[in-house]
Image (cartoon, grey):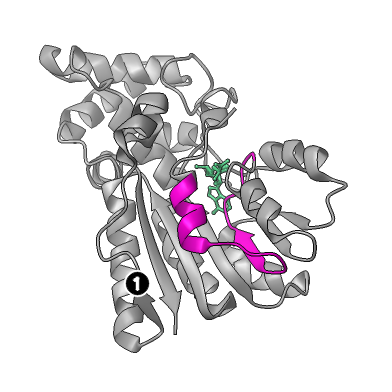
Amino acid sequence: MHKPVLLEEVLEYLNPQPGQKFIDATINGGGHGLAMAERIRPEGKLLGIEWDKEIFENLKKRVSSDENIILVNDSYVNLKKVAEEKAFGKADGILFDLGISSWHLESGRGFSFQKDEILDMRFSPDLTVSALEVVNTWSAEDLERIIREYGEESFARVIVREIVEQRKSGIIRTTGQLAETIKKAVPEWYVRGRLHPATKTFQALRMAVNRELENIEKGILAALEVLKKDGRLAIISFQGLEDKIIKKVCLEEKRKGTIRVITKNVIRPGREEVKDNPRARSAKLRVYEKN
Ligand SMILES: C[S@@+](CC[C@H](N)C(=O)[O-])C[C@H]1O[C@@H](n2cnc3c(N)ncnc32)[C@H](O)[C@@H]1O
């Protein structure tokens, strides 16, 4: 079960009230979404969007008889179209909680370097390029660029050199093979470090396969079109580049006069939450209000 991050803070800033309408753009198992749904009853509506079909189907089974909840299996990039198709109208608040869930690591779809599974990493089968293709067919230059940029991995060059070397003797088919290749490439102290040496490369591949940074920008812009005046947009990110895109897009919107910034300083989880849920340690929450 995925533990929701910064749940109290999200509820405080979005402040759902009976009769209001909210969108959870990344609903997953509903950690935030279902808590919001509880607060808008009996008349309010929650629109939950989830790109991953398996996760969507699981949640759908759990909430199928709930009249306050509408669930859609799509990318939040299409948030405006989805809201229109469901005749949802304008929202009082919208939440994005980016990245993968604990569920993905257990999904068998190649998100975890702790297991030996076929490299895939696609959130949706609609995506045509999987991690298998990226690792085995992309040029060394492109691989190095994504591992350096999306993974912020300073050993990108040596990792890619080793990947290209391995490719000469056959396909790198599994997460285990890729993790071993990375270990072989990087210095010994990095292998023994606190962070698993494959962490940043895996993150980079996942972000490239799912076009995550591109999606964030499109998603925020779509959300701003669906928000009511004075409605709030809350975004939780887990990684520097995600936060950078959020700040960039929202700064432009602030300059245009579309939004105002509510969280002058980013909101971070408290020590207790991090102790209870280590995944929360890099979380950052930013909140904006529509003008
Ligand atoms: C961190 S989890 C959300 C967890 C949720 N807030 C909770 O606490 O239960 C992020 C979810 O967003 C989904 N996701 C990723 N990209 C998406 C996109 N472009 N559109 C919709 N959902 C997406 C992932 O499949 C994952 O289930």
Q: Residue furthest right?
A: 65
Q: Is residue 104 left or right of residue 56?
A: left
Instruction: In the rendered view, tell whether residue 29 sits above or below residue 102.
Output: below
Q: Residues within 10 Å of mark 1 (few under 14, many from 20)?
A: many
Does any portion of residue 78 appear in the rendered image?
yes
288 or 219, which lies in front? 288
Residue 12 part of the magenta-drawn span? yes
Position in image of residue 108 (x %, y %): 59, 22
Residue at figure coordinates x 64%, y 43% from the top left: 30
Residue numbers of the magenta segment: 8-29
Residue at figure coordinates x 34%, y 41% from the top left: 269
199 or 251, which lies in front? 251
Position in image of residue 165 (x %, y %): 26, 22
Figure quadrant of the C terminus: bottom left
Mark 1 highlights which residue?
250
Position in image of residue 187 (x %, y %): 12, 17
Q: Residue furthest bottom?
A: 257
Figure quadrant of the N terminus: top right
Residue 200 part of the magenta-drawn span? no
Residue 287 found in image quarter:
bottom left
Residue at figure coordinates x 53%, y 72% from the top left: 222
